[in-house]
Image (tube, rainbow, N blue to C red):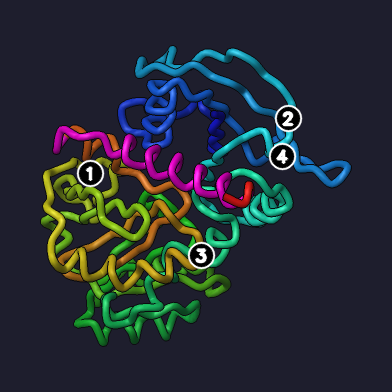
Amino acid sequence: MRIGFLMDPLEDVRVDHDSTFALMLECQRRGIQVRELRQEWLWLAGGKVRSRMRTVSVQRKAGSHFRVVTDVDAPLSDLDVIFLRKDPPVDVEFLRATQLLELAPGPLWINYPAGLRAANEKLFALRFPDLVPPTLVAREIAQLRRFIDEQGGDGVIKPLDGCGGQGVVRVRRGDPNASALLEMATEGGRIPVMAQAYLPAVREGDKRVVVLGGEPIGAVLRVPPPGELRANFATGGSPAAAPITARDREICRRLAPHLDALGLWLVGIDVIGSKLTEVNVTSPTGLVEIDALIGESLEAKVIDFALRRAGLRRARAAGM
């Protein structure tokens, strides 16, 4: 069994936080060969998609967390499963990589390339308007200001293709910097952004729910540091225990058939209070923090799921 991880450079991962690294460790624990890939290593010739692949040995020891066992060029069909976990931005290079991957039948993708293209992490949630806070997507500054006024003069602006809380700002009526913030966010009205009503519940935390095959398997409350709007771990948020509530399950039930249709098996939904704010599909995090809080291994559940799905694919291909 060989499992590949198409990801950002392994050299740069945070071993005490990175969910992709946790999945690699779990594969290694089971004796599964672990291979690292990057989107810039993909290429096609003779009708076959190939990539540079580094077979690696990993350990949770910062500074010496991996060792390259072999460094080869191989077809993607050599792999049984490929976890596609390249961080945003979802730019042209990212989209081309997903298109190239689709020319390589064989491995099970988690998540499917077409699904990654279809499900913008900010916009996908807007398919369920009754689940999300009041939202506007626009680039015109006057329109954004009117929306913020309609929300009681308090709103949050998010870039559509960012991650880790980058570029998220709170804009309030009467703030002398409001126009400047909107100009910077939209690059002077050239690019659209998402504006949402400010949710006071964010002061208590932004809940990340990890969803596998449409079912919630764990949750963590990301609590923002004092004086900070954003609760993402990348911006200093701290983890706190969080139950999976009836509301969380309701949201997952609503999303499940849509996620399944797109092959989005492993996602992370963000919930503030009772409102769905994002559906993270590219490289959802939270596994390590949830493990530490509940004393379980979510990555073991993910690998069990991947092996089961890969086994079903092989059985169907063999006509069993």
| Disc 1 + disc 3, Cβ < 8 Å | no
Q: Earlier in the sequence, mark 4 or mark 2?
A: 4
Q: Secondary structure at mark 3?
A: loop
In this rendering, the label closer to the viewer, 2 or 1 = 2
Main SS type for the magenta part? helix
Label 4 Cα neighbours within 10 Å, binned few <14 / some 14-19 / many ≥20: many
Amino acid carrying mark 4 in the image: Leu
Amino acid carrying mark 3 in the image: Leu
Residue extending farthest to the right is 46
Residue 211 location (% of width, % of height): 32, 54
Distance (Cα) linking label 1 and label 4: 35 Å
- Judging by the rendered image, the residue that carries numbered circle 3 is 262
Q: Nearer the viewer, residue 84 or 265?
A: 265
In this rendering, the label closer to the viewer, 1 or 3 = 3
Q: Which residues are magenta?
A: 293-317
Label 1 Cα neighbours within 10 Å, binned few <14 / some 14-19 / many ≥20: many
In this rendering, the label closer to the viewer, 1 or 4 = 4
Amino acid carrying mark 2 in the image: Ala
Distance (Cα) linking label 3 and label 4: 23 Å
